Amino acid sequence: MTFRNGFTSLPLYRFLAPLMRIIVDIRPLLEPRRSGVGTYAAEMVKTLAARGTHDYALFANSRTRDLPPDVPPPSDRVTHRFSRHPNRLLNASFAFFDGPKVERLAGPADVVYLPNLNFIATELPLIVTVHDLSFVRFPHFFSRKQRLWHTFVNARSMLRKASAVVAVSNHTKQDVIETFGVREDRVIVASPGVSPTFSPRSEDELDRIRQKYGLKKPYFLFLGALEPRKNIVGIISAYERIGADLDLVIAGGKGWLYEEIFRRAAASPKRGRIRFLGYVDDADKPGLYAAASALVYPSFYEGFGMPPLEAMAVGTPVVASHVSSLGEVVADAGLLIDPYSVDDIADAMSSVVSDARLAAVLRQRGFERAKRFTWDESAKRLEDLFSAL
């Protein structure tokens, strides 16, 4: 990999590189209900701080919110830089006036790292993580407000100017190269990992989850934002075609155009067996996955897809799309389907619950597959990138 300073290999000089001070934008951590982006930012920051290879200035801004408890506390290697400007004012200032520079708000540093696309102004080398380009590939899946936000962030300009780009999957890497013309040697992959909390659960834990959410029957599970891109209407249609005696449990916060999902469920002949749980606390997710007969995730587009990875880690069979990055994440550890074919989704759902041998094979493969994705390895790749600039 070639960087602007001319370095072409990492292993040798990594151990000779001086300690650096990195400004990390932790604004995604302030969202009260975290998505995969917030989880990525939180876990990556926690892992980088624990490794202690560099110094980190954690930058956040909010007029009304405080830092969440899982932000690494101040230490010899970590400082907090929390400003209290109105977010809209600060973002507008970043976007239209190219200031104030974030290093003025967070203190002198060597590099600025954004765990997600965001408004920023800096004269320092900038590294940006890109989770997906769904806002470019499928703009109709986004509200007018969301499309406007992405327009003003101007990902094309930001990524072309960035010293390096971090993609969460090889698929996203190719998307960045093809869509924005970023040179391949300036894009690395640092995928999400899976937290140790996502592991097989005890029967007592499964009973607690079932009782808490009133889950009396075996069930298929979908977990994610309720929005068109996730193809939840397709899940409901497929569910109607199978005869298995399982409920369909849909967990996740309401996203854009969620109303159509509720309308479709209300009109279903199986509406009495379709359960909506709403947003689920992180602490309950491992048990909810583990108690499910299968996770069904036929999304039309994902930059990575954390729910399938988390489900595999606890031992739950996965049915997922073969499109975008999901095939890369799941590989042969799940049943990969065409998200545009309801029959394909239904056949996979039926197979995984009617064939005990198949389910057992998928569980074992899922365990092994999930082991390949670790936060520590991805944090190390970021550290190498910091040192290379």
Image (spheres, grey):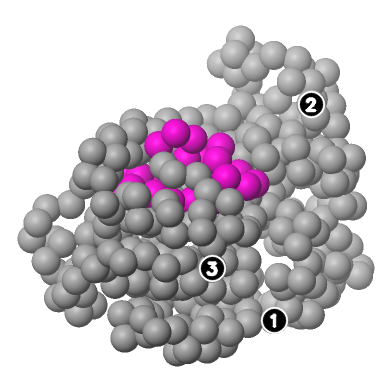
Magenta stretch contains residue 334: no
Which amino acid does the dot numbered 2 rest on?
Asp
Q: Nearer the viewer, residue 283 or 299?
A: 299
Look at the image and tell me in which quarter the N terminus lies.
Answer: top right
Mark 3 Cα-neighbour bin, 10 Å: few <14, some 14–19, many ≥20: many
Q: Earlier in the sequence, mark 2 or mark 1?
A: 1
Which of disc 2 and disc 3 is earlier in sequence?
2
Mark 1 and mark 3 lie on one chain; the one further toward the N terminus is 1
Residue 370 occupies quadrant = top left
State the image coordinates of residue 373 (x, y, percent, origin top left): 44, 36
Pointer 1 residue = 86
Between the residue at mark 2 and the residue at mark 1, the CA separation in whole angstroms equals 37 Å
**Quick one: label 1, few (<14), some, or many (20+) residues within 10 Å?**
few
Marks 3 and 2, Cα distance to the nearest angstrom?
38 Å
- Asked if labels 3 and 1 touch by Cβ distance under 8 angstroms, the answer is no
The residue to which callout 3 is attached is: 234
Residue at 82% x, 55% y is 155
Q: Which residue is situated farthest in the top direction here?
A: 12
Tag shown at residue 185: 2
The x, y position of residue 225, in whole percent, is 52, 70
